[in-house]
Image: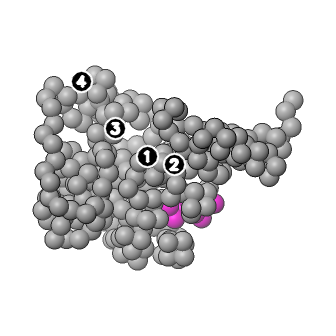
Amino acid sequence: MPHPERVVGMHFFNPPPLMKLVEVVAAEGSSNQALAATTAVAQQMGRTPIRAKDSPGFVANRLARPFSLESLRMLGDGVADVATIDRVVRLGGGFRMGPFELLDLIGLDVNLEIARSFFAQGGEPERWRPHPIQERLVAEGRFGRKSGRGYHDYSEEREPDPELGIDAPTLDPKHLAKIDPAAEQILTRLFAQIANEAAFALEEEIASPEDMETAMKLGFNWPLGPLGFAELIGPDRAADLLEELQAEKGEAYSPAPALRRIISSST
C-alpha cells in the first residue's frame, strides 16, 4: 500500500511533447516534501509546474469552463451566430481560436461528456450545466471536424480574418464596433464569466493567483489569464453585469460571493 503522504498527481497537457504546463496535484494527505519533489521532477523535464488542488478539472480545465458554456448561452440567446461569436473572440478577445472552432476541434461528443462530468462532480451548479444546443448536435451526429460538421461546416474553407488594427484583447467600444455591433456584448459577457469562475476558484483555493494565470496562458494559450481578463473588464463591472443577467436569465449568472473583493485584491 502506498503511503498517502507520498501520493501526488501530475497532469500533463496534450500533446505532451509540445505543452510545457504540468499541474502538480495535491491529494488530501500529500506532504510538502512529496509536492516539492514532484515539482522538481517537472522542472527537470523542462516543464512549467503549477500547484493544483484535487478538485474537478484541477486548474486549467476548470477555468476554461466559461469559454464554451457562456458562448453556447449567447448562441442560444440569439446574441449572435456561431461565426460572429468566433470572429469577435478572435479579433476582439485576442484568442487564436473561437469557442466553437475549439469545440469542433475537441469533438462535440467528447466535450459534452466532459461538460456532464463537470456538472455532476461540481454538485450541479447552474453555471456548469451542459447546454441543450450541444446535446442536440451530438444527437444529430454532428461531432465537429472529425465528422465534417459541428458548429461549422468543414466542406468549405473559412475566409481569413480582416486586419482591423485592433490591439486585442480589448473592450474599447470604438474598436469592437469595427468587428460587429454585438462585439461588446459578446466580450463583456464572456469576460465577466471568466472573472466569475476565477473568483469561485480563488475562494475554493484550487490554486494561487499566479498559477491560475500561468495555467491559462500555457495550458490553453489564452492572451491573458483569468485575472487579467477580470482586470480588463473590472470586477465591479463584471459583478454588475452578472447580477443583471442573473435577474433576467437565472442562476447560471450568480456572482461569486466575493467576486468584487477577491478579484480586486488579486489583480
Q: Earlier in the sequence, mark 3 or mark 1?
A: 3
CA–CA distance between discs 3 and 1? 13 Å
Magenta stretch contains residue 204: yes
Say whether residue 129 is visible.
Answer: no
Q: Earlier in the sequence, mark 3 or mark 2?
A: 2
Of the pair 179 and 120, the residue shown nearer to us: 179
Residue at 19% in and 71% down:
173
Q: Amino acid at mark 1?
A: Phe
- State yes or no: discs 3 and 1 in contact (Cβ < 8 Å): no
State which quadrant residue 266 falls in. bottom right
- Helix or strand or loop: what does disc 3 sit on? helix
Of the pair 229 and 68, the residue shown nearer to us: 229
- State yes or no: discs 1 and 4 in contact (Cβ < 8 Å): no
Magenta segment: 198-205
Residue at 83% in and 44% down:
5
- State yes or no: discs 4 and 3 in contact (Cβ < 8 Å): no
Residue 258 placed where, x, y %?
Answer: 53, 72
- Helix or strand or loop: what does disc 2 sit on? helix
CA–CA distance between discs 1 and 2? 8 Å
Q: Amino acid at mark 2?
A: Ala
Dot in front, 1 or 4: 1
Asked whether, in this view, residue 136 is left or right of residue 54, the answer is left
Q: Is residue 251 above or below residue 132?
A: below
Residue at 21% in and 35% down:
152
What residue is pinned by disc 3? Answer: 103
Dot in front, 1 or 2: 1
CA–CA distance between discs 4 and 3? 13 Å
